Amino acid sequence: MPLPSTPLHLLLLFLAAVSSGRLPGAASKSTLEPCASSTACPALLSYTLYAELRLAEVAVLFAADPLAILAANAIDYAVPDAASRILPAGLSLRVPVPCACSNGTRRTSPVRYVSRHGDTLASVASRVYGGLTAPEWIRESSGIINADDVVDAGTALLVPLHCACFGGVDSWNGVPAVYLTYVVAKGDTVPAIAKRYRTTATDVMSVNDLATTADVAAGDIVVLPLPACSSSFPTSTSDHGLAVANGTYAVTADRCVQCSCGPAGNLDLFCVPAPPLADAACSRMQCGNSSMVLGDFTLVMTAAGCRVTSCGYGGYANGTILTALTTTLKPQCPGPHQFPPLVAPPTSSFFETYLGPSPAPMPSQGGADPTMAPTGSPDAVAAGAPTTVRHLGELTGVFALCLVVGMMW
């Protein structure tokens, strides 16, 4: 039996909509970047695990290298069995992806997902991929012509994911940037999101064309420019265009080279040989006409200043690690290079300190040292503002209940 459209009923609907942060019928909003070039760029996706998953399973979902995921989150992948550890549900990770151009919009090349019993296009988009795609995108890429949202178990779906490039530059301040795609969670605000990712509310509003700091709701997709170290490798190299978000790492050259950006404020890309891996067969990394290898440098103080000679990384081409010997003159000799801090692979005991807010957090299963939270992984730091917003929604609901009771009395 339909509910009567009484003033009381309409008031209830309005108050419920206000407390949820979205008016009835309003769809989630996404910041979509139009494109015309087929050139891909490095991008990041903020992904929250919907269940306990091995890192290898997360990598398969996004067709990504497990070690690249660890590096993008400043997690020490040299720890034994780091890639095979089980990650807790609710964990927030940055997933590095190449951002391409499809049908005039920036998206990743579709990744392959085999449906399971009970899957629908909507559940795959919202639950499995955390809202980073849309049912319509999956339907279009997979060539599904029927209107039924349910898919048979075992169906191979092609899933494109939201991403952004914007020229690899933060338009607000002109510094190199890697763009991270973030799905707004319940209770998020623009200032809280900005604080979590070490940017400003003004920058977030500018990039996403938001009118006010309150102009976001759960399910919206926003993109965040993260300061980054850029590269100038030749176009002939396989890692041309490499960019690394500040405070994190990237693994390149078939897992033979590790590049880092940071710590905070340092936007000079620094590459060294990666920790030895059993499955990596690496070519020579010595600079020509020198005994120096990748990452080495010498300092000589002269009357004109400090002469710095270094062996730097020049990209990866046809199985060869390119190096270059350079000499520069600086007013003062630099100190030892500082690397972004690394953390151990997360476990359930990391849950409260390592994670940001999640819709349904698991209880912590043990104590955690707050100093272990990664400086370079804002995903890992819980922001205080969303809690206040959630409390405001709860107070709104209580107020609505009291108002209704008063009217009925």
Image (cartoon, helix red, strand yellow):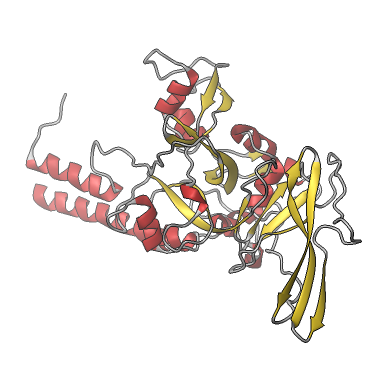
Residue 264 position by quadrant: bottom right
Camera sees residue 252? yes
Q: Quick one: which residue is furthest to the top in this view? A: 146
Instruction: Measuring from the top left, give residue 72's x and y in whole percent.
Output: 64, 51
| Residue drawn at (41%, 61%) of the image | 172
Compared to residue 250, the image places residue 341 above or below, namely below
- Give the tally of numbered discs: 0
Instruction: Tell me if 409 is positioned left or right of 401 in this view.
Output: left
How far across and down, in percent of the image, does residue 375 sit? 61, 64
- Residue situated in front as seen by the camera: 16 or 190: 190
Corner quadrant of residue 193: bottom left
Snapshot quadrant of residue 95: top right
Q: Tell me if I can see residue 347 in this picture.
A: no
- Residue 128 location (% of width, % of height): 52, 33
Q: Is residue 335 left or right of residue 18?
A: right
In the image, 209 versus 296, the foreground residue is 296
Front residue of 315/42: it is 315
* Residue that appears at 36% across and 56% down: 206
Residue 143 image offset from top left, x and y in percent: 46, 16
Residue at the image position 66 percent from the left and 56 percent from the top: 74
- In the picture as drawn, the residue positioned furthest to the bottom comes out as 303
Q: Is residue 30 above or below residue 145?
A: below
